[in-house]
């Protein structure tokens, strides 16, 4: 009987296929889980990650996203500043535009200054409180006996100045310049309807205002033919003298006077 052949231990022999055995999962300890999660939270899911990580261990979100550029100031969003061009590109155009805007603003301020100033003073007149002011001198171009010009500033509305006829004038002089807001005129001889109808009245008055620098401003005023006070709004600055000229008389006949009972002036308080 022949002896059994011996097998070379280094020889490669065929093997039958076998079922692969999966490696057993490794269960981490609680301490390892805590160490893994120590660090800053993920911006997407909030999971804690170690500082050296670049992506989240749960959702794979980037832990260090690129920072957004700082927003531009508002003036950089307006043409011609909004362009981000190379150095020197468009500088000449932008300079000309800025220069034109500055010149336009300066010109507008110069031409609109009087209108803006007048509007400002008018608002102050409406918001402020009007205060009465009394002239230091009253002069008339003419008066009838017993009815001098001072009757128009005595505070009594049943006494009057009797003018010799149409075109007669009163001149009021004040101690210092002021802002004239209102003029209240009591036309006729009295506020009583009976006394008012006895004398003639002027239905038009020329209000001439002279400022401290000598400039004059004329305003034609139409009065109502009724007893009582009538307010005239003016809004004139630096007033020094005021002259009233009576025109357009009504019911003027023989034996009747052209009467003016009271004139009151108000300044801005």
Image: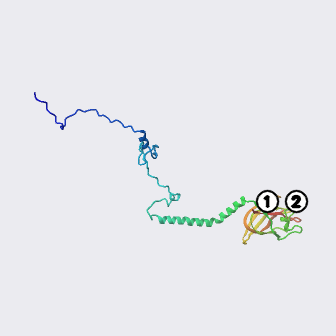
Residue 251 at what x, y percent from top left?
A: 84, 62
Mark 1 / mark 2, whichever is N-terminal:
2
Residue of label 1: 230
> Are the residues flagged by discs 1 and 2 in contact, CB closer than 8 Å?
no
Residue of label 2: 195
Can residue 114 be seen here? yes
Residue 174 at what x, y percent from top left?
A: 78, 69
Q: Nearer the viewer, residue 115 or 59?
A: 59
Q: Give the residue furthest to the left.
A: 1
**Image quadrant occupied by the N terminus:** top left
- Horizontal arrangement in the rendering, residue 208 relative to residue 261 (left or right): left
Residue 42 at what x, y percent from top left?
A: 45, 45
| Classed neighbour count for the residue bearing mark 1: other residues with Cα under 10 Å, few (<14), some (14–19), many (≥20) | some
Helix, strand or loop for disc 2? helix
**Image quadrant occupied by the C terminus:** bottom right
Q: How many numbered callouts?
A: 2
Q: Give the residue furthest to the top.
A: 1
Q: Which mark is residue 258?
A: none
| Classed neighbour count for the residue bearing mark 2: other residues with Cα under 10 Å, few (<14), some (14–19), many (≥20) | few
Q: Which residue is pictured at 61% across the width and 65% down the height?
A: 109
Quote the CA–CA distance across marks 1 and 2. Answer: 17 Å
Residue 230, image quadrant: bottom right
Residue 144 at what x, y percent from top left?
A: 87, 68
Q: Which residue is pictured at 50% across the width and 66% down the height?
A: 95
- Horizontal arrangement in the rendering, residue 48 relative to residue 25 (left or right): right
Q: Nearer the viewer, mark 1 or mark 2?
A: 1
Helix, strand or loop for disc 1? strand
Q: What colour-coding does the image apply?
A: rainbow
Can residue 224 be seen here? no
* Above or below: residue 212 compared with residue 185: below
């Amino acid at each position: 009987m022949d002896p059994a052949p011996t097998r070379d231990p280094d020889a490669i022999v065929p093997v039958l296929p076998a079922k692969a055995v999966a490696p057993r999962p490794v269960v981490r300890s609680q301490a390892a889980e805590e160490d893994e999660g120590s660090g800053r939270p993920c911006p997407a899911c909030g999971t804690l990650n170690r500082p050296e990580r670049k992506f989240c261990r749960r959702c794979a979100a980037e832990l260090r996203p690129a920072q957004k550029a700082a927003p531009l100031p508002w003036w950089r969003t307006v043409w011609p500043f909004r362009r981000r061009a190379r150095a020197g590109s468009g500088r000449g155009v932008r300079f000309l535009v800025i220069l034109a805007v500055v010149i336009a603003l300066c010109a507008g301020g110069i031409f609109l200054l009087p209108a803006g100033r007048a509007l400002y003073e008018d608002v102050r007149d409406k918001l402020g409180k009007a205060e009465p002011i009394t002239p230091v001198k009253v002069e008339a171009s003419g008066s009838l006996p017993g009815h001098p010009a001072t009757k128009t500033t005595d505070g009594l509305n049943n006494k009057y100045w009797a003018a010799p006829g149409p075109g007669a004038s009163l001149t009021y002089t004040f101690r210092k310049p002021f802002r004239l807001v209102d003029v209240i005129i009591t036309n006729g001889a009295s506020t009583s309807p009976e006394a008012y109808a006895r004398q003639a009245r002027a239905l038009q008055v020329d209000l001439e205002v002279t400022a401290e620098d000598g400039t004059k401003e004329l305003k034609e005023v139409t009065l109502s033919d009724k007893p009582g006070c009538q307010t005239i709004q003016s809004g004139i600055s630096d007033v020094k003298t005021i002259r009233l000229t009576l025109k357009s008389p009504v019911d003027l006949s023989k034996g009747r006077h052209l009467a003016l009972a009271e004139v009151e002036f108000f300044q801005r308080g």
